[in-house]
Image (cartoon, grey):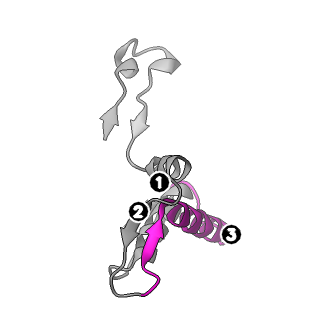
Amino acid sequence: MSVDARATASPAAPASLPVRDDGLDAVRRWARRAPDRLALVEHARDDGRWSWARLDARADAWARALAAIGVGAGDRVALLAGTRAECVALLHGALRAGAALV
């Protein structure tokens, strides 16, 4: 995790809170910057080439699905899965829903 240099300006001011760059928004940024660029490859599947746009869309779909069943900020989501690309989307979706992974 990196902290923006602006975060150390004044500890008392609200604007001085750390700016998080923990990767959660990285998929969204890449989906906007290069939507068709290859994000990950799942070699075991014929359709295993995932663009940033596809990964972002699947993460959003997982976030909506989790929110629809009541998962939100502070909840814990267990991820028991293999190495499929869909797991990466689920991971990002759970984090977008505000949950922690366990």
> Which of labels 3 and 2 is toward the front?
2
- The residue lying at 48 percent from left, 14 percent from top is 13
Rendered position, 19 above or below 96: above
Which residue is labeled 1 in the image? Answer: 27
Q: Taking the image as drawn, is residue 101 in sight?
A: no
How far is mark 3 from mark 1, CA to CA? 22 Å
In magenta, the rendered stretch is 46-74
Circle 3: residue type: Ala
Task: Classify the position of the C terminus by image quarter.
Answer: bottom left
Q: Quadrant of residue 84?
A: bottom left
Mark 3 vs mark 2: which is more N-terminal? 2
Residue 51 on image: x %, y %: 48, 65
Q: Nearer the viewer, residue 88 or 12?
A: 88
Mark 3 vs mark 1: which is more N-terminal? 1
Q: Nearer the viewer, residue 86 or 94?
A: 86
Residue 23 on image: x %, y %: 39, 49
Provide the secondary structure element on which disc 3 rests.
helix
Rendered position, 9 above or below 72: above
Mark 1 vs mark 2: which is more N-terminal? 1
Please give the label number shown on residue 94.
none
Which residue is labeled 3 in the image? Answer: 68
Circle 2: residue type: Ala
> Which of labels 1 and 2 is toward the front?
2
Provide the secondary structure element on which disc 1 rests.
helix
Residue 97 on image: x %, y %: 57, 58
- The residue lying at 48 percent from left, 58 percent from top is 95
Task: Classify the position of the N terminus by image quarter.
Answer: top left
Which residue is labeled 2 in the image? Answer: 39
